[in-house]
Image (tube, helix red, strand yellow):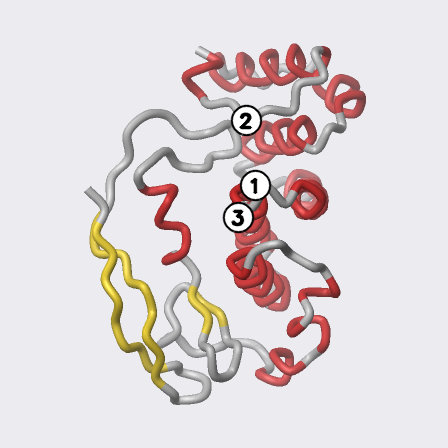
Amino acid sequence: MTMIDEEEIKCSLCGKISKQPVLLSSNQFGYQDLDLRPSEMYRSTINTWVLECPHCGYVATNLEDELTIDTDFLESEEYKTCNGIEFQSKLSEIFYKYYLIQTKKSDDVDSFFAILQCVWTCDDANDEENAKLTRQIAINIADKIIESGNERDNKFIVLKADLLRRSGEFDQLIEEYENLTLGDELLDNIIKFQVKKAYDKDNNCYTIEEVS
């Protein structure tokens, strides 16, 4: 059962108080999507994962945490306009701003998952153009992580395959993955599944269960 309450939270940046949704409890039934999006009921609590202060525009998973980058960045056109991207939902804007903050911290892994969650909000809003745009950003970050020799390479290699397919980049997916094996039965099955769907020009959402 999911329980969400509303609490008054003081922003660490401007010191002002706002009412924010707070997740008290939730659960999951079923399998994750191939891009790791959790199953219901937890996936529908996404509006509680990152919050925005309505007074100063600071976004964070916890508004009481101090901003660790130059606060002037929040006044930049890049931040305030989401790089000029016209998202179809306010939630997408919030997650994109969260992604921008993570990039200023120079943490590729955190940046990746921030933009990936922005992708999910675009999907929910049927914002296909920006879902593709944000997936491309995620692909570029995944490439950086893979090239850096991160110990979780295989995870990002497999995630990139889903990002490519959902973006309609079928030829690139086939070229990079058709003969790729990682030595892990589940991951290799996911790759084979992705390649097959790419040949079918299928960009639909699938879960781990459907691979099995």
Along the viewing direction, whichever of 138 and 81 lies nearer the viewer: 81
Left or right of residue 86: residue 183:
left
Residue at 25% x, 72% y is 7
Q: What is the three-letter code of the residue carrying label 2?
A: Cys
**Which structural element holds mark 2?**
loop
Q: What is the three-letter code of the residue carrying label 3?
A: Thr
> Label 1, label 3: how many angstroms apart (C-alpha)?
5 Å
Q: What is the three-letter code of the residue carrying label 1?
A: Asp
**Vertical placement of residue 186 versus 125, above or below:** above
For disc 1, the marked residue is 123
For disc 2, the marked residue is 205
Q: Which percent across, then down, holds residue 36? A: 47, 34
For disc 3, the marked residue is 121
Near mark 1 (Cα within 10 A), the count class, few <14, some 14-19 or many ≥20, is: some
Q: Which percent across, then down, holds residue 166? A: 65, 30
**Which image quadrant is residue 119 in?**
top right
